[in-house]
Image (spheres, rainbow, N blue to C red):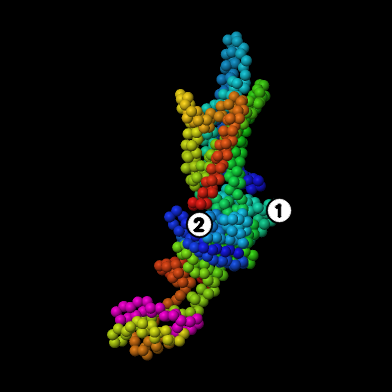
Amino acid sequence: MRNIWVICQKELHSYFVSPIAYVLLTMFSLIFGYVFWNEVRIFNLESLQAQMSGQAPPMNVNEMLIRPVLSNGLIGFIIVVLIVPLITMRLFAEEKRTGTIELLATSPIRDIEIILGKWLAALALYASLLFFTALNFGFLFKYGNPDWRPLAVGYLGLLLEGGALLAVGTFISALTRNQIIAAVGTIGVFLLLWILEWPSGYETATWAQVMAYCSVNKHYESFTKGVLDSKDAIYYISLIFLGLFLTSRSMESLRWRS
Amino acid sequence: MITVQGLTKRYAHTLAVDHISFEVQKGQIVGFLGPNGAGKTTTMRILTCFLPPSEGTATVAGFDVLDQPMEVKKRIGYLPETPPLYPEMEIGEYLTFVGKLKGMSGASLASRVEEVEERCAIADVRNKLIGKLSKGYRQRVGLAQAIIHNPEVLILDEPTAGLDPKQIIETRDLIRSLAPDHTILLSTHILPEVEQTCEQVLIINKGKLVATDSVHNLQNRARGAESVLLEVEGRNGAVDAQTIQHRLETVSGVSRVLFKETRSNRSVFEVESLKDRFIRGDLARAIVESGWNLNELRPSAVSLEEIFLQLTGGEKADEPAPAEAVVQGENQ
């Protein structure tokens, strides 16, 4: 437990001492802020129109503002294709290239502690990205009266999806000593995981359903609706376990092969 | 402290280490000598539990590297060929991190970090980023991280590689100063290093252990005994090389006569004396009195380098870099 924290601290230190964390935080906050601003504008226009046409439909902030922001395709895409690969690419690849992996591997600390420490640090950086986006929603609570629970479930979904992708990214980073290869490999795998659900749009056969189930984005949908579906949570949690398990296998094979 | 038995490491297509066995006693500094690619690093990686052996056993401080790696790792300080440094950390931060990795904490760690910084002469730069350090400082930080948890065994892979002559001397002094409390196994392909730092030497070549001896003995072999190259010619026609050899062997003080080659009717021998015996005069007399011509007689100096090259089947003895020559000069 203590060892996990030692590794985690060190990784967080590397993230926040180098520009990586700040560049990611700035760019993601900017884009998220823009998406949020855009949705707010749409929401305002719609409510104005509703008023002008004389009808007064129940304008639900959760339904018509929070949900479109959280399920925005661009945000999801950026997380999957940019944020997570950029966070995980260096985790093991850099240690392998500079040889510091030898220090970790010859210290009295278990592989799984190294892996968990690194994954948790990546998750913490990712969570801090989400935290800054959450500030946007703070305004809604100041001027409106949204229900916080669907929002919290939405963020839980983002966290779980991120955690799962980070675990897979950690594994891919452990396969190579080249950060670029790690990043490109991760992006490729994530894109495939993203579009796996396509055939289910026109095909009802079991294989299409299975592919849709494996698709990483599919499971996020329910969270954006404020629905905490155990099926989707289990998918992400098992993906986390799979990713971390494969990483530990890969670290072990490093010793047997190298 | 370190016991290695029948240790073998096979990679996909190569045999990196081939059934080597040796022992290192507590408190010794042992030099692990061999040309590049001889299997030094692989052996060290096995001892530090970074790689598992394919065959054979290795124990450190009584713990097997396969069965109790955690116990072994606690007792080993390891400096790999490239020091495992994080360029984005300050020296103090880095040493604290390594100390924590090795299971230290709190005030004892803080004081130990300071102690090690003093000892490795990096205290004045402790707040510098490692990425901005010169090669010599990096090496010292590498050494500092290896000794931070005061391990019983130190394994140093080419600790002086890439340093300038002054830094090499400093590093050697540092290593020697660690000797009383630590058992040290250091690898190198530079011979003077072994002569100057180590008590015991293991020579490895192509994965095989070719010699184990104390440096003292090796130096005696190199300095105490004399080795002479002789070219002898029969005056009237050819003389059987064997006859000459038998005659040479009877000269007092000769320990060994080695037949080298015959060119037309001239035979070349290498003659080694017993320790501290001067044999050139007696050899010359013996040859002339037997009625042969002595065409050539010259001392062939047997240096540690030659022993090394003989054992490892190397080519020429002009291996050591100019920097090394400077160092030796400064030391003497």
Q: Indicate the amino acid at tag 2.
A: Ser
Residue at mark 2: B54
Of residues B201 and B168, which is closer to you in this image?
B201
Residue shown at the point (67%, 21%) measured from the top left = A145
Asked if residue B79 lies left or right of residue B314, the reply is right
Disc 1 element: helix
Q: Say few, some or many: other residues with alpha carbon within 10 Å of mark 2 (under 14 / 14 to 19 / 20 or more).
A: some
Residue at mark 1: B107
Asked if residue B267 lies left or right of residue B149, the reply is left
**Magenta part of the protein: which range?**
B254-281
Q: Indicate the amino acid at tag 1.
A: Ala
Residue shown at the point (47%, 30%) measured from the top left = A207
Q: Chain of mark 2?
A: B
* A194 within the magenta span: no
Location of residue A230 (image quadrant): top right
Disc 2 element: loop
First in residue order: circle 2 vs circle 1:
2
Asked if residue A172 lies left or right of residue B117, the reply is left
Residue shown at the point (48%, 40%) measured from the top left = A185
Location of residue B111 (image quadrant): bottom right
Q: Chain of mark 1?
A: B
Q: Principal SS element in the magenta part?
A: strand
* B256 within the magenta span: yes
